[in-house]
Amino acid sequence: MSTLAHELGHGYHNARLAQSEPLQRETPMTLAETASIFCETVVQNAALADATGPERLYVLETSLMGHAQVVVDIHSRFLFERAVFERREKGDLNPQEFGELMTWAQRETYGDALATLHPYMWAVKPHYYSLAFYNYPYTFGLLFGLGLYAQYVAAREAGTEAEFQTRYDELLASTGRADPLTLAARFGIDLHAPDFWEGSLDVIRRQIDVYVEAVG
Ligand SMILES: [Zn+2]
């Protein structure tokens, strides 16, 4: 159901973009997951409203594992690739140096929370080298989608859901025409303001609280 919701979100986004000219439809990676994350979150929260027992735990656990991967692990990947690009300007890196940078990035991110580090993570995925900074858009996309969801919930409570939807549709229709900072500003969101991102993380924090409560 989550995957179906996710892909239907992409479909909805494409349907909004269909109003634009072909050259204006190309969406940057940072905004490509906006509608899919939003739609997935709507469905997850609707499922949580009714689910009980093991079903409830399953929904929460699946969602939180994904969020931990995107918010926490991708941070280590970002630190790693930034360090690699900085070092690479000055010369080649050998496998041992890649391994050292990788474990450094994991320690920076996880502190002492990991029992073992993975020095060969840099060789496991092509994400680090196929495009410059291919990892952080996943974190950006998740938190941007969740931030919009937080605004949607607030609009629903304030009775301004219809107005939210108009602005949401406009945002999706214009993702190929301006950079995220400009588009978000049109939506009344300052991407440099910590408040917006805190709102996104609050959506995850609430899920953690519900999970802790559910497992007793
Ligand atoms: Zn997607």
Image: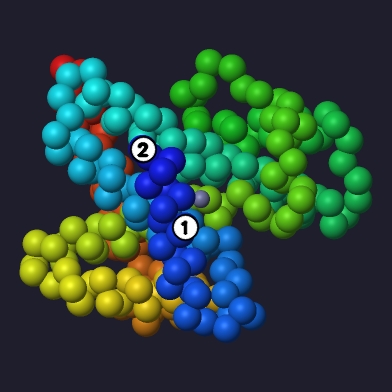
Earlier sequence position, callout 2 versus callout 1: 2
Q: Mark 1: which amino acid?
A: His
On the picture, is 146 further left or further right than 81? left
* Mark 1 within 8 Å of ligand 1, using the beta carbon: yes
Residue named by callout 1: 10
Q: Secondary structure at mark 1?
A: helix
Quarter that holds the C terminus: top left
Q: Is residue 96 above or below residue 189?
A: above
Total labels: the figure holds 2
Residue at x 57% of width, y 69% of height: 27
Q: Amino acid at mark 2?
A: Met
34 to 120, vertically: above or below: below
Q: Is residue 14 left or right of residue 46?
A: right
Judge whether residue 189 can be spotted in this image: no
The residue indicated by pointer 2 is 1
What residue is rendered at 15% in x and 24% in y? 52
Mark 2 in CB contact with mark 1 (< 8 angstroms): no
Q: Residue at position x 50%, y 31% from top?
A: 110
- Observer-nearest of 35 and 184: 35
Side of 97 where 72 appears, left or right: left
Residue 169: image x %, image y %?
A: 35, 73
Q: What residue is shown at x 15% (from left), y 38% (from top)?
A: 49
Q: Is residue 32 visible?
A: yes
Which image quadrant: the N terminus? top left
Query: Looking at the picture, how far across and down is residue 32, in whole percent?
Result: 52, 61
Q: Secondary structure at mark 2?
A: loop
Name the one closer to the observer, 97 or 178. 178
Please give left or right for residue 202 compared with residue 2 in the image.
left
| Image quadrant where residue 61 sits | top left
Cα–Cα span, label 2 and label 1: 14 Å
Label 2 crowding class (10 Å Cα cut-off): few <14, some 14-19, many 20+?
A: few
